[in-house]
Image: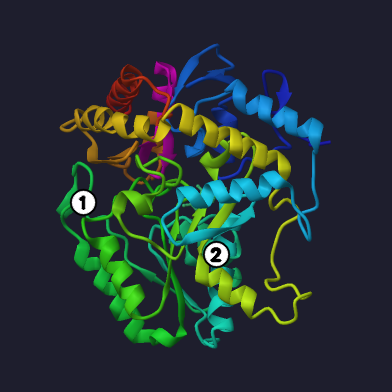
Amino acid sequence: MSGSNKTVNGVDMSAYWLPFTPNRYFHQHPKIMQSAKGAYYFDDHGRKLFDGLSGLWCSPLGHADPRIGAAISKQYEKMDYCPAFQMASEDTFRLATRVADMAPKGLNKVFFTNSGSEAVDTALKIAIGYHRVMGNASRIRMIGRDRAYHGVGMGGISVGGMVANRKMFASMMMPGVDHLPHTLNLSQMAFSKGMPTWGAHLADELEKIVALHDANTIAAVILEPVQGSTGVIVPPQGYLQKIREICTKHAILLIFDEVITGFGRLGANFGADRFGVVPDMITFAKAITNGVIPLGGVIVRDDIYDSIIANGGQEQAIEFFHGYTYSGHPIPMAAGHAVLDIFESDDLVNRARALEPVLENGLHAMKGKAGLLDIRNFGLSGAVELEPIAGKPGLRALKVLEACIERGALVRVAGDVIAVGPPFISEPKEVEFLCSVLGDAVDAAM
Ligand code: PLP
Protein backbone atom coordinates (compact mmCIF):
# COMPACT_ATOMS: atom_id res chain seq x y z
CA MET A 1 0.00 0.00 0.00
CA SER A 2 1.42 3.36 -0.93
CA GLY A 3 -0.61 5.26 1.65
CA SER A 4 -1.30 8.28 -0.57
CA ASN A 5 -4.52 9.50 -2.03
CA LYS A 6 -2.93 11.65 -4.75
CA THR A 7 -4.29 10.51 -8.04
CA VAL A 8 -4.28 11.65 -11.63
CA ASN A 9 -6.96 10.37 -13.99
CA GLY A 10 -7.82 7.85 -11.28
CA VAL A 11 -4.23 6.54 -11.14
CA ASP A 12 -2.40 6.55 -7.81
CA MET A 13 0.70 8.71 -8.20
CA SER A 14 2.21 8.02 -4.80
CA ALA A 15 4.49 5.03 -5.47
CA TYR A 16 6.41 6.37 -8.43
CA TRP A 17 9.43 8.52 -7.52
CA LEU A 18 10.03 10.66 -10.58
CA PRO A 19 13.70 11.06 -11.54
CA PHE A 20 15.20 14.56 -11.86
CA THR A 21 11.76 16.02 -11.16
CA PRO A 22 10.42 18.28 -8.43
CA ASN A 23 8.02 15.57 -7.20
CA ARG A 24 5.94 17.87 -4.97
CA TYR A 25 5.48 20.40 -7.77
CA PHE A 26 4.70 17.59 -10.20
CA HIS A 27 1.93 16.23 -7.99
CA GLN A 28 0.34 19.68 -8.11
CA HIS A 29 0.95 20.06 -11.85
CA PRO A 30 1.02 16.54 -13.30
CA LYS A 31 2.05 16.10 -16.91
CA ILE A 32 0.88 12.82 -18.39
CA MET A 33 1.79 11.70 -21.89
CA GLN A 34 -0.45 9.03 -23.35
CA SER A 35 0.89 8.33 -26.83
CA ALA A 36 3.41 9.48 -29.40
CA LYS A 37 3.53 9.41 -33.19
CA GLY A 38 5.93 11.12 -35.56
CA ALA A 39 7.09 14.44 -34.11
CA TYR A 40 4.19 14.66 -31.63
CA TYR A 41 3.13 13.54 -28.17
CA PHE A 42 -0.51 13.37 -27.11
CA ASP A 43 -1.31 14.14 -23.48
CA ASP A 44 -4.16 13.32 -21.14
CA HIS A 45 -5.89 16.62 -21.94
CA GLY A 46 -6.20 15.55 -25.57
CA ARG A 47 -3.48 18.00 -26.60
CA LYS A 48 -1.16 17.35 -29.53
CA LEU A 49 2.33 18.50 -28.52
CA PHE A 50 5.21 19.09 -30.89
CA ASP A 51 8.20 17.20 -29.45
CA GLY A 52 10.55 20.15 -29.13
CA LEU A 53 13.34 18.17 -27.44
CA SER A 54 13.11 14.86 -29.34
CA GLY A 55 12.08 13.08 -26.14
CA LEU A 56 15.09 13.78 -23.94
CA TRP A 57 17.34 14.48 -26.95
CA CYS A 58 17.00 10.80 -27.80
CA SER A 59 14.29 10.51 -30.49
CA PRO A 60 15.51 12.36 -33.60
CA LEU A 61 13.44 10.14 -35.90
CA GLY A 62 10.22 10.99 -34.09
CA HIS A 63 8.07 8.30 -32.56
CA ALA A 64 6.64 4.94 -33.54
CA ASP A 65 8.56 4.57 -36.79
CA PRO A 66 7.29 1.13 -37.83
CA ARG A 67 10.69 0.14 -39.21
CA ILE A 68 12.21 0.17 -35.70
CA GLY A 69 9.27 -1.70 -34.18
CA ALA A 70 9.44 -4.37 -36.89
CA ALA A 71 13.17 -4.90 -36.34
CA ILE A 72 12.68 -5.27 -32.59
CA SER A 73 9.85 -7.72 -32.91
CA LYS A 74 11.70 -9.78 -35.51
CA GLN A 75 14.73 -9.98 -33.21
CA TYR A 76 12.49 -10.97 -30.29
CA GLU A 77 11.23 -13.94 -32.28
CA LYS A 78 14.74 -14.89 -33.37
CA MET A 79 16.68 -14.45 -30.09
CA ASP A 80 15.46 -12.34 -27.19
CA TYR A 81 18.71 -12.45 -25.20
CA CYS A 82 22.25 -13.66 -25.62
CA PRO A 83 24.68 -13.90 -22.70
CA ALA A 84 26.95 -10.89 -22.91
CA PHE A 85 30.08 -12.58 -21.61
CA GLN A 86 32.16 -15.03 -23.67
CA MET A 87 29.70 -14.85 -26.59
CA ALA A 88 27.75 -12.42 -28.74
CA SER A 89 25.28 -12.29 -31.61
CA GLU A 90 26.45 -11.56 -35.15
CA ASP A 91 24.40 -8.38 -35.17
CA THR A 92 26.30 -7.14 -32.12
CA PHE A 93 29.59 -7.30 -34.05
CA ARG A 94 27.88 -5.72 -37.05
CA LEU A 95 26.50 -2.79 -35.05
CA ALA A 96 29.90 -2.16 -33.47
CA THR A 97 31.38 -2.02 -36.98
CA ARG A 98 28.69 0.38 -38.19
CA VAL A 99 29.18 2.69 -35.21
CA ALA A 100 32.97 2.60 -35.71
CA ASP A 101 32.50 3.36 -39.42
CA MET A 102 30.55 6.50 -38.50
CA ALA A 103 33.17 7.63 -35.97
CA PRO A 104 36.32 9.63 -36.75
CA LYS A 105 39.24 7.73 -38.26
CA GLY A 106 41.28 5.75 -35.76
CA LEU A 107 38.41 5.13 -33.33
CA ASN A 108 37.33 1.62 -34.27
CA LYS A 109 36.64 -0.28 -31.06
CA VAL A 110 33.19 -0.19 -29.45
CA PHE A 111 32.23 -1.22 -25.91
CA PHE A 112 28.45 -1.42 -25.43
CA THR A 113 26.65 -0.29 -22.29
CA ASN A 114 22.98 0.39 -21.52
CA SER A 115 23.04 4.11 -20.89
CA GLY A 116 25.03 7.29 -21.15
CA SER A 117 25.92 7.13 -17.46
CA GLU A 118 27.38 3.67 -17.89
CA ALA A 119 29.20 4.78 -21.03
CA VAL A 120 30.88 7.58 -19.08
CA ASP A 121 31.95 5.37 -16.19
CA THR A 122 33.19 2.79 -18.71
CA ALA A 123 35.27 5.41 -20.56
CA LEU A 124 36.84 6.60 -17.30
CA LYS A 125 37.75 3.01 -16.42
CA ILE A 126 39.24 2.43 -19.88
CA ALA A 127 41.36 5.57 -19.45
CA ILE A 128 42.72 4.41 -16.10
CA GLY A 129 43.20 0.85 -17.36
CA TYR A 130 45.06 2.05 -20.43
CA HIS A 131 47.54 4.16 -18.50
CA ARG A 132 48.09 1.33 -16.06
CA VAL A 133 48.97 -1.22 -18.73
CA MET A 134 51.23 1.37 -20.36
CA GLY A 135 53.21 1.54 -17.12
CA ASN A 136 51.72 4.86 -16.01
CA ALA A 137 49.75 3.70 -12.99
CA SER A 138 50.09 7.15 -11.42
CA ARG A 139 47.76 8.60 -14.06
CA ILE A 140 44.49 8.33 -12.18
CA ARG A 141 43.20 11.91 -12.01
CA MET A 142 40.25 13.01 -14.14
CA ILE A 143 39.51 16.51 -15.35
CA GLY A 144 35.88 17.47 -15.96
CA ARG A 145 34.31 20.88 -16.38
CA ASP A 146 31.96 23.16 -14.47
CA ARG A 147 28.35 22.81 -15.59
CA ALA A 148 29.11 19.46 -17.24
CA TYR A 149 26.59 16.63 -17.15
CA HIS A 150 28.04 13.16 -17.49
CA GLY A 151 25.20 11.10 -16.08
CA VAL A 152 24.67 9.83 -12.59
CA GLY A 153 27.20 7.05 -12.04
CA MET A 154 29.87 7.71 -9.44
CA GLY A 155 32.42 8.53 -12.12
CA GLY A 156 29.94 10.71 -13.97
CA ILE A 157 28.93 12.81 -10.98
CA SER A 158 32.58 13.18 -9.98
CA VAL A 159 33.66 14.62 -13.33
CA GLY A 160 30.30 16.37 -13.74
CA GLY A 161 30.00 19.98 -12.78
CA MET A 162 26.37 20.40 -11.79
CA VAL A 163 26.48 21.29 -8.12
CA ALA A 164 23.03 19.94 -7.32
CA ASN A 165 23.96 16.52 -8.69
CA ARG A 166 26.99 16.32 -6.42
CA LYS A 167 26.37 17.98 -3.11
CA MET A 168 24.20 15.27 -1.54
CA PHE A 169 26.72 12.61 -2.51
CA ALA A 170 30.04 14.12 -1.48
CA SER A 171 31.20 10.87 0.09
CA MET A 172 30.78 9.04 -3.23
CA MET A 173 33.03 11.27 -5.33
CA MET A 174 36.08 9.79 -7.03
CA PRO A 175 39.24 11.24 -5.48
CA GLY A 176 41.57 13.34 -7.58
CA VAL A 177 39.08 15.03 -9.87
CA ASP A 178 39.53 18.62 -10.95
CA HIS A 179 37.36 20.83 -13.14
CA LEU A 180 37.94 23.28 -15.96
CA PRO A 181 35.83 26.42 -15.91
CA HIS A 182 32.80 26.39 -18.18
CA THR A 183 32.82 28.74 -21.14
CA LEU A 184 29.54 30.61 -20.74
CA ASN A 185 30.02 34.32 -20.09
CA LEU A 186 26.92 36.33 -20.89
CA SER A 187 28.73 39.66 -20.71
CA GLN A 188 30.97 38.51 -23.58
CA MET A 189 28.77 36.29 -25.68
CA ALA A 190 25.06 36.71 -24.99
CA PHE A 191 22.90 36.28 -28.12
CA SER A 192 25.78 34.77 -30.15
CA LYS A 193 24.63 32.83 -33.17
CA GLY A 194 26.49 29.53 -33.30
CA MET A 195 29.97 29.46 -31.79
CA PRO A 196 30.93 32.48 -29.69
CA THR A 197 34.05 34.28 -30.83
CA TRP A 198 35.17 34.98 -27.23
CA GLY A 199 36.58 32.38 -24.88
CA ALA A 200 39.19 30.14 -26.58
CA HIS A 201 41.70 31.31 -23.96
CA LEU A 202 39.70 29.44 -21.30
CA ALA A 203 41.30 26.24 -22.63
CA ASP A 204 44.59 27.50 -21.17
CA GLU A 205 43.13 26.79 -17.74
CA LEU A 206 43.94 23.18 -18.53
CA GLU A 207 47.65 24.05 -18.57
CA LYS A 208 47.24 25.52 -15.09
CA ILE A 209 45.52 22.38 -13.82
CA VAL A 210 48.24 20.22 -15.38
CA ALA A 211 50.92 22.35 -13.75
CA LEU A 212 49.15 22.08 -10.40
CA HIS A 213 48.82 18.30 -10.39
CA ASP A 214 51.65 17.21 -12.75
CA ALA A 215 50.71 15.61 -16.06
CA ASN A 216 51.94 12.24 -14.80
CA THR A 217 48.96 12.03 -12.45
CA ILE A 218 46.27 12.85 -15.00
CA ALA A 219 44.46 10.12 -16.94
CA ALA A 220 41.88 12.00 -18.98
CA VAL A 221 39.91 15.12 -19.70
CA ILE A 222 36.20 14.56 -20.35
CA LEU A 223 34.03 17.18 -22.05
CA GLU A 224 30.72 17.46 -23.81
CA PRO A 225 31.57 19.23 -27.09
CA VAL A 226 28.38 21.26 -26.53
CA GLN A 227 27.20 21.19 -22.92
CA GLY A 228 23.63 20.01 -23.35
CA SER A 229 21.93 19.43 -20.02
CA THR A 230 22.97 22.74 -18.50
CA GLY A 231 21.45 24.61 -21.39
CA VAL A 232 23.24 24.24 -24.73
CA ILE A 233 26.55 25.93 -23.96
CA VAL A 234 28.37 26.17 -27.29
CA PRO A 235 32.20 26.04 -27.26
CA PRO A 236 34.02 29.22 -28.25
CA GLN A 237 35.77 29.15 -31.60
CA GLY A 238 39.13 27.40 -31.24
CA TYR A 239 38.50 26.19 -27.68
CA LEU A 240 38.22 22.47 -28.37
CA GLN A 241 41.25 22.57 -30.67
CA LYS A 242 43.33 24.05 -27.85
CA ILE A 243 42.09 21.46 -25.38
CA ARG A 244 43.11 18.75 -27.86
CA GLU A 245 46.58 20.24 -28.27
CA ILE A 246 47.17 20.46 -24.54
CA CYS A 247 45.98 16.88 -23.98
CA THR A 248 48.23 15.60 -26.74
CA LYS A 249 51.20 17.55 -25.42
CA HIS A 250 50.83 15.95 -21.96
CA ALA A 251 49.70 12.46 -23.10
CA ILE A 252 46.33 12.98 -21.41
CA LEU A 253 43.41 11.16 -23.03
CA LEU A 254 40.58 13.30 -24.33
CA ILE A 255 37.06 11.89 -24.00
CA PHE A 256 34.17 13.55 -25.78
CA ASP A 257 30.88 12.76 -24.09
CA GLU A 258 28.61 12.72 -27.12
CA VAL A 259 25.54 11.21 -25.48
CA ILE A 260 23.52 14.18 -26.80
CA THR A 261 25.73 15.43 -29.61
CA GLY A 262 26.36 12.03 -31.24
CA PHE A 263 24.38 10.73 -34.19
CA GLY A 264 23.55 13.88 -36.02
CA ARG A 265 22.40 16.42 -33.43
CA LEU A 266 25.11 18.85 -34.53
CA GLY A 267 24.52 18.23 -38.23
CA ALA A 268 27.42 15.74 -38.48
CA ASN A 269 27.80 12.17 -37.27
CA PHE A 270 29.54 13.36 -34.11
CA GLY A 271 30.47 16.68 -32.57
CA ALA A 272 34.06 15.58 -33.19
CA ASP A 273 33.35 15.77 -36.95
CA ARG A 274 31.54 19.07 -36.79
CA PHE A 275 34.29 20.72 -34.74
CA GLY A 276 37.14 18.96 -36.55
CA VAL A 277 38.66 17.73 -33.28
CA VAL A 278 39.34 14.02 -32.81
CA PRO A 279 39.21 12.78 -29.22
CA ASP A 280 40.62 9.46 -27.98
CA MET A 281 37.22 8.14 -26.92
CA ILE A 282 33.61 9.05 -27.61
CA THR A 283 30.70 8.09 -25.37
CA PHE A 284 27.28 7.72 -26.96
CA ALA A 285 23.71 6.63 -26.07
CA LYS A 286 20.24 8.10 -26.71
CA ALA A 287 19.81 8.50 -30.50
CA ILE A 288 21.52 5.22 -31.42
CA THR A 289 18.17 3.48 -30.77
CA ASN A 290 16.06 6.61 -31.20
CA GLY A 291 15.29 6.28 -27.49
CA VAL A 292 13.15 3.23 -28.13
CA ILE A 293 15.23 0.93 -25.95
CA PRO A 294 18.29 1.63 -23.79
CA LEU A 295 21.72 1.40 -25.39
CA GLY A 296 24.97 3.28 -24.92
CA GLY A 297 28.63 2.72 -25.52
CA VAL A 298 32.17 3.96 -25.85
CA ILE A 299 34.08 4.25 -29.12
CA VAL A 300 37.77 3.80 -28.41
CA ARG A 301 40.98 4.63 -30.26
CA ASP A 302 42.45 1.43 -31.68
CA ASP A 303 45.73 1.46 -29.81
CA ILE A 304 44.02 1.99 -26.44
CA TYR A 305 42.11 -1.24 -26.99
CA ASP A 306 45.18 -2.96 -28.46
CA SER A 307 47.33 -2.03 -25.46
CA ILE A 308 44.81 -3.26 -22.91
CA ILE A 309 44.28 -6.51 -24.82
CA ALA A 310 47.99 -7.10 -25.42
CA ASN A 311 48.70 -6.69 -21.72
CA GLY A 312 45.94 -9.02 -20.63
CA GLY A 313 48.17 -11.85 -19.49
CA GLN A 314 47.59 -15.38 -20.70
CA GLU A 315 45.32 -15.87 -23.69
CA GLN A 316 42.51 -17.44 -21.63
CA ALA A 317 42.52 -14.47 -19.20
CA ILE A 318 39.98 -11.65 -19.30
CA GLU A 319 41.81 -8.46 -20.26
CA PHE A 320 39.34 -5.87 -18.95
CA PHE A 321 37.20 -6.69 -15.94
CA HIS A 322 34.15 -4.69 -16.84
CA GLY A 323 30.82 -5.25 -18.59
CA TYR A 324 27.06 -5.45 -18.14
CA THR A 325 24.53 -8.30 -18.36
CA TYR A 326 22.96 -6.34 -21.21
CA SER A 327 26.11 -5.22 -23.07
CA GLY A 328 25.47 -5.93 -26.73
CA HIS A 329 21.91 -7.16 -26.01
CA PRO A 330 20.39 -8.41 -29.28
CA ILE A 331 17.21 -6.32 -29.02
CA PRO A 332 18.85 -2.89 -28.74
CA MET A 333 21.27 -4.08 -31.42
CA ALA A 334 18.29 -4.69 -33.72
CA ALA A 335 16.92 -1.26 -32.87
CA GLY A 336 20.34 0.28 -33.53
CA HIS A 337 20.59 -1.35 -36.96
CA ALA A 338 17.10 -0.15 -37.88
CA VAL A 339 17.91 3.39 -36.72
CA LEU A 340 21.16 3.54 -38.67
CA ASP A 341 19.36 2.15 -41.74
CA ILE A 342 16.88 5.02 -41.43
CA PHE A 343 19.67 7.55 -40.92
CA GLU A 344 21.13 6.37 -44.23
CA SER A 345 17.96 5.93 -46.25
CA ASP A 346 16.37 9.19 -45.11
CA ASP A 347 19.63 11.20 -45.10
CA LEU A 348 18.85 12.41 -41.60
CA VAL A 349 22.16 13.97 -40.63
CA ASN A 350 21.88 16.29 -43.61
CA ARG A 351 18.26 17.01 -42.75
CA ALA A 352 19.34 18.06 -39.28
CA ARG A 353 22.00 20.30 -40.81
CA ALA A 354 19.47 21.83 -43.20
CA LEU A 355 17.14 22.69 -40.29
CA GLU A 356 19.89 24.44 -38.34
CA PRO A 357 19.35 27.91 -39.87
CA VAL A 358 15.58 27.58 -39.42
CA LEU A 359 16.06 26.98 -35.70
CA GLU A 360 18.70 29.70 -35.45
CA ASN A 361 16.47 32.30 -37.10
CA GLY A 362 13.41 31.25 -35.12
CA LEU A 363 15.17 31.45 -31.78
CA HIS A 364 17.05 34.67 -32.43
CA ALA A 365 13.84 36.36 -33.60
CA MET A 366 12.98 36.44 -29.87
CA LYS A 367 15.87 38.80 -29.11
CA GLY A 368 14.61 41.91 -27.35
CA LYS A 369 11.83 40.18 -25.45
CA ALA A 370 11.55 41.17 -21.81
CA GLY A 371 13.22 38.76 -19.41
CA LEU A 372 15.50 37.03 -21.90
CA LEU A 373 19.16 37.01 -20.86
CA ASP A 374 20.53 34.95 -23.75
CA ILE A 375 19.68 32.98 -26.85
CA ARG A 376 22.15 30.38 -28.11
CA ASN A 377 22.14 27.69 -30.76
CA PHE A 378 24.32 25.18 -32.55
CA GLY A 379 23.37 22.30 -34.82
CA LEU A 380 19.78 21.35 -34.25
CA SER A 381 19.89 22.48 -30.63
CA GLY A 382 19.29 25.75 -28.91
CA ALA A 383 18.35 27.45 -25.67
CA VAL A 384 16.94 30.62 -24.22
CA GLU A 385 18.07 31.79 -20.81
CA LEU A 386 15.42 33.48 -18.68
CA GLU A 387 15.76 36.04 -15.96
CA PRO A 388 14.92 34.02 -12.82
CA ILE A 389 12.00 35.03 -10.60
CA ALA A 390 13.67 36.70 -7.60
CA GLY A 391 14.23 34.16 -4.85
CA LYS A 392 12.65 31.30 -6.82
CA PRO A 393 15.20 29.78 -9.16
CA GLY A 394 13.74 27.51 -11.79
CA LEU A 395 10.13 28.58 -11.36
CA ARG A 396 10.02 30.89 -14.39
CA ALA A 397 11.21 28.07 -16.64
CA LEU A 398 8.56 25.71 -15.29
CA LYS A 399 5.95 28.37 -16.07
CA VAL A 400 7.34 28.67 -19.60
CA LEU A 401 7.16 24.89 -20.01
CA GLU A 402 3.52 24.93 -18.92
CA ALA A 403 2.72 27.84 -21.22
CA CYS A 404 4.36 25.92 -24.09
CA ILE A 405 2.27 22.84 -23.34
CA GLU A 406 -0.90 24.96 -23.36
CA ARG A 407 0.17 26.20 -26.81
CA GLY A 408 1.10 22.81 -28.26
CA ALA A 409 4.81 22.17 -27.76
CA LEU A 410 7.12 20.37 -25.35
CA VAL A 411 10.43 21.94 -24.37
CA ARG A 412 13.05 21.09 -21.74
CA VAL A 413 13.63 22.95 -18.51
CA ALA A 414 17.18 23.20 -17.11
CA GLY A 415 17.23 25.62 -14.22
CA ASP A 416 16.09 28.90 -15.76
CA VAL A 417 17.10 27.82 -19.23
CA ILE A 418 14.72 26.36 -21.80
CA ALA A 419 16.40 23.98 -24.23
CA VAL A 420 15.07 22.81 -27.57
CA GLY A 421 16.25 20.12 -29.97
CA PRO A 422 13.53 19.18 -32.44
CA PRO A 423 13.43 15.85 -34.27
CA PHE A 424 15.39 15.61 -37.52
CA ILE A 425 12.18 14.60 -39.29
CA SER A 426 10.62 18.00 -38.50
CA GLU A 427 9.37 20.19 -41.31
CA PRO A 428 10.79 23.75 -41.29
CA LYS A 429 7.34 25.11 -40.45
CA GLU A 430 7.20 22.87 -37.37
CA VAL A 431 10.52 24.26 -36.14
CA GLU A 432 9.14 27.77 -36.74
CA PHE A 433 6.00 26.80 -34.80
CA LEU A 434 8.15 25.59 -31.88
CA CYS A 435 10.00 28.93 -31.77
CA SER A 436 6.83 30.99 -31.98
CA VAL A 437 5.19 28.94 -29.19
CA LEU A 438 8.30 29.42 -27.07
CA GLY A 439 8.28 33.17 -27.71
CA ASP A 440 4.62 33.45 -26.69
CA ALA A 441 5.25 31.29 -23.63
CA VAL A 442 8.15 33.51 -22.55
CA ASP A 443 5.82 36.54 -22.79
CA ALA A 444 3.11 34.72 -20.88
CA ALA A 445 5.49 33.75 -18.06
CA MET A 446 6.78 37.30 -17.49
N1 PLP B 1 26.33 12.27 -20.71
C1 PLP B 1 25.67 13.28 -21.28
C2 PLP B 1 26.42 14.32 -22.04
C3 PLP B 1 24.28 13.36 -21.19
O1 PLP B 1 23.63 14.39 -21.73
C4 PLP B 1 23.59 12.35 -20.49
C5 PLP B 1 22.13 12.39 -20.37
O2 PLP B 1 21.48 13.34 -20.74
C6 PLP B 1 24.33 11.32 -19.90
C7 PLP B 1 25.69 11.31 -20.04
C8 PLP B 1 23.64 10.25 -19.12
O3 PLP B 1 22.93 9.41 -19.95
P1 PLP B 1 21.83 8.42 -19.33
O4 PLP B 1 20.72 9.27 -18.81
O5 PLP B 1 21.46 7.56 -20.51
O6 PLP B 1 22.50 7.64 -18.26
Residue occupying image coordinates x 53% and y 48%: 99
Confirm or reject: label 2 Cβ below 8 Å from ligand 1: no
Above or below — where is 100 with respect to 416? below
Q: Nearer the viewer, residue 155 or 75?
A: 75
- Residue underneath mark 2: 123
Q: Residue at x 80, y 52 (%)?
A: 83
Provide residue 302's location: percent of width, then percent of height.
51, 66
Q: In the shown orientation, is residue 276 left or right of residue 264?
A: left
For mark 2, does the 10 Å Cα neighbourhood hold few (<14), some (14 to 19), or many (20 or more) residues?
many
Q: Amino acid at mark 2?
A: Ala
Q: Quadrant of the C terminus?
A: top left
Q: Residue 39's x, y, as percent?
A: 47, 22
Amino acid identity at mark 1: Leu
Magenta stretch, residue numbers: 401-421
- Out of 129 and 418, give the one closest to the viewer: 129
Residue at (18%, 33%) from the top-left corner? Answer: 367
Quadrant for residue 318, please give it.
bottom right
Q: How many marks?
A: 2
Reading the image, the residue beneath label 1 is 186
Q: Secondary structure at mark 2?
A: helix
**Measured from the top left, where is residue 406 in percent x and y?**
43, 18
- The question of residue 418 being in magenta is answered with yes
Name the element at disc 1.
Answer: helix
- For the residue pair 22 and 101, the one nearer the viewer reads as 101
Q: Could you tell whether 296 is left or right of 324 in the image?
A: left
